[in-house]
Image (tube, grey):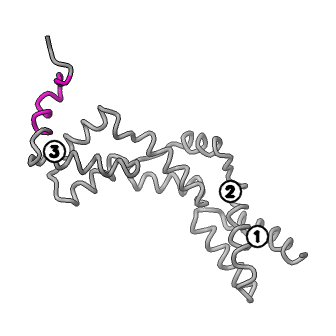
Amino acid sequence: MEELNEITGPHKDHQRDLQDEDSPRKKCYNSAIAHLARKDYSRFKLRKKLVEKGHERGTVEEVLDELIERNYLREDLYKEARIKGLLRKGYSFNAVSYKMSQEMCPATEEEIFAVAGENDLTGNDQLRELIEKKVRIDYDFVSNKKKLRERTLRYAVNRGHNISDASKFYDQIIQKYEEE
């Protein structure tokens, strides 16, 4: 009868490598686990980290395949968390899509809208909050209100928002501040 601790299947040969503390595979595996213990990564980002640490590409690919098979590396969770983080930072839906594709982890419109809906982050509400926050923080410190407008609109555009929408919201928000 087979022992319960013995691994069978595609990882049987790797079990021996993982028991050998000095094997390159064991070092790569441990490094990957240490990274994943701190935060989620995409396959692309974790590969880049491991290769930068000096692990061979072939070993890295084997380790990544095993981590995915064992559900330690979950790109779906990484993608969801990354989309949520970018939306919370005020990036527009298009900017989120672009940034995700730059990270070799493309997100569909449906995925972005789903995460936005779950977190009550619609495009206009998101832009309004972004501008309100920027004005609230800078209003008392920037004496030249024209510069405040330029700075705020530039900030919104850098986050991927339409300048005409940002300008409209800015005018509404600044009017409230000037009335107070």
Residue type, numbered disc 3: Lys
**Residue at the extreme right of the image, as rendered:** 179
Query: Which residue is at a point 14% across and 52% down the rendered structure image?
Result: 56
In the image, which residues are magenta? 5-18
Residue type, numbered disc 2: Gln
Q: Residues within 10 Å of mark 2 (few under 14, many from 20)?
A: many
Calculate the distance from the C-alpha at mark 2 to the C-alpha at mark 3.
45 Å
Write down the residue under mark 1.
Answer: 170
Instruction: Mark 2 or mark 3: name the one nearer the start of the chain.
Output: 3
69, 26: nearer the viewer: 26
> In front of the other: label 1 or label 3?
3
Based on the picture, tell me whether residue 13 belongs to the magenta stretch.
yes
* Image mark for residue 61: none
Q: Secondary structure at mark 3?
A: helix
- Vertical comparison of 156 with 105: above or below: below
Instruction: Mark 1 or mark 2: name the one nearer the start of the chain.
Output: 2
Q: Secondary structure at mark 1?
A: helix
Picture quarter containing residue 88?
Answer: bottom right
Write down the residue under mark 3.
Answer: 26
Calculate the distance from the C-alpha at mark 1 to the C-alpha at mark 3.
55 Å
Write down the residue under mark 2.
Answer: 126
